[in-house]
Image (cartoon, rainbow, N blue to C red):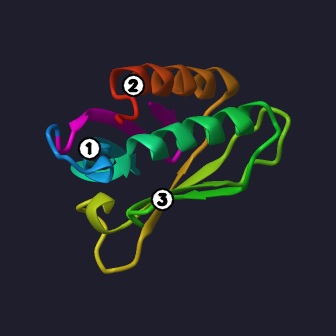
Amino acid sequence: MKLSGPEGVFELNILDYECSDSPRFMDRNWLIVSLKTCYHNQECVRTASILSTWELELLLKWMRSVADENELSPKLSFIEPALGFNNVSSGRGDYQFRIKLGSDALPNWQRGPMPFYLPVAPDKRELQRAITDLEQQLRRFPVRD
């Protein structure tokens, strides 16, 4: 999934399940995620287990609701506080997000304990491509019983 804008680029890709053979439901559904960020020509790639399969489903539903201009909530957060999404769009196809990057997702060029908020402003087509990509990633890494 890729979202961009004049100031930043954010890319999220699921690499694999973290624990393939755990007997515990929660452990079997953690994902290893690759995050690529770019802000004012500073780039970073981070790999961490910061999302679960059901949180990926939630992100997909949230993004669909924003694209349909019927958002579920202006903010989306997860169990791991390393990643979050905030919709600051004004509506009518003008999409603007602030993506929270903290702890394991914090870019290496960002110093200090505070999270960094990456601004992205995809157009309608890019947002639809990101949603389609998330759907494909979820099919590859579905919630496991």
Badge 3 is on which residue?
Answer: 78
Above or below, comparing residue 145 to residue 22 in the picture:
above
**Mark 1 lies on residue:** 28
**74 relative position to 2: left or right:** right
Q: Secondary structure at mark 1?
A: helix
Q: Residue at x 40, y 51 (%)?
A: 39
Q: Residue at (52%, 27%) from the top-left corner?
A: 130
Point out the tag, 3 or 1, that comes first from the N-terminus: 1
Give residue 6's position: percent from left, percent from top: 55, 41
Q: Magenta segment, which residues?
A: 1-19
In space, the residues marked 1 and 2 are separated at their CA atoms by 16 Å
Residue 141 showing in the rendered view: yes
The residue identified by callout 2 is 137
Identity, as a three-letter code, of the amino acid under mark 3: Phe
SS class, disc 2: helix
Q: Is residue 47 above or below residue 78?
A: above
Nearer to me, 13 or 26: 26
Crowdedness of circle 2 by 10 Å Cα count: few (<14), some, many (20+)? some
Principal SS element in the magenta part?
A: strand
**Residue 5 counted in the magenta span:** yes
The answer to whether residue 5 is seen in the rendering is: no
Mark 3 lies on a secondary structure that is loop
Towards the viewer: 117 or 67: 67
Amino acid at dot 2? Gln
Quadrant showing the C terminus: top left
